[in-house]
Image (tube, rainbow, N blue to C red):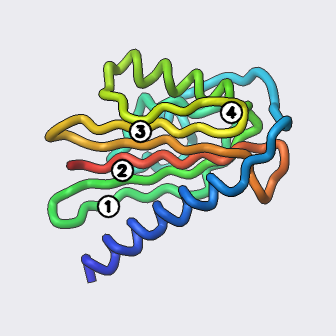
Amino acid sequence: MMADKKHAFSLLLLVAAAGLSACSNPGNEAGGGHFRTLAQESLDKPRYLPGDLPIPAGAGITFTEGEEVDGKKSSMLIYETQESLDELGSAYQKYISDKALKRGTQIVDSNNIIISGKVPDAYSYSIIGSSSALNPGSAEIIVTWIQN
């Protein structure tokens, strides 16, 4: 049963990442927003995600899950926002830099965000974003945090 959950979570991550890469919608940027931290959001705190992770004020959180499988913790957060991908990318790049997180891939432009890294013997993370296929003018962001 636990192996099925682990595979389902991995599959969900891959499907979500593939879906985002296929749904860019250039030119629909909603300017200037205010960022809060995940801990300030009015929802049950997602397990295993950093509480200081920046989230745009007014973001609509559509999915959050944290689980522990075979002693390793993983978490996923998906949200939609009117914030531009440029602004989101800048906020996440600043967060990664301020926290001195190890960087892997960093692609940030007005159409996509792909930021990932791995901290040896600790965790891997990814922040993936693109324009929402379902809500034109909105961006959809997927954040994952996985213990190594």
Q: Residue at x 44, y 70 (%)?
A: 11
Label 3–label 1 contact, CB within 8 A: no
Front tag of 3 and 1: 3
Front tag of 3 and 2: 3
Front tag of 4 and 1: 4
Q: Residues within 10 Å of mark 3 (few under 14, many from 20)?
A: many
* Sooner in the amino-acid sequence: mark 3 or mark 2: 2
Q: Is residue 60 left or right of residue 46?
A: right
Residue 16, relative to residue 42: is it above or below? below
Q: Residues within 10 Å of mark 2 (few under 14, many from 20)?
A: some
Quarter of the image for residue 130 reads top right
- Whole-percent x, y for residue 13 in the image: 46, 61
Quarter of the image for residue 3 reads bottom left
Please name the residue that numbered disc 2 is placed on: 47
- Whole-percent x, y for residue 69 in the image: 23, 65
- SS label for mark 2: loop
Alpha carbons under labels 2 and 1: distance apart:
7 Å
Please name the residue that numbered disc 1 is placed on: 67
Alpha carbons under labels 4 and 1: distance apart:
28 Å
Please name the residue that numbered disc 3 is placed on: 116
* Sooner in the amino-acid sequence: mark 4 or mark 1: 1
Q: Name the amino acid type tagged 4.
A: Leu
Q: Is residue 73 left or right of residue 18?
A: left
* Sooner in the amino-acid sequence: mark 3 or mark 1: 1
* Sooner in the amino-acid sequence: mark 3 or mark 4: 4
Label 2–label 1 contact, CB within 8 A: yes
Quarter of the image for residue 123 reads top left
* Sooner in the amino-acid sequence: mark 2 or mark 1: 2
Q: Name the amino acid type tagged 1.
A: Glu
- SS label for mark 1: strand
Of residues 107 and 94, which is closer to you in this image? 107
Residue 30, relative to residue 81: is it above or below? above
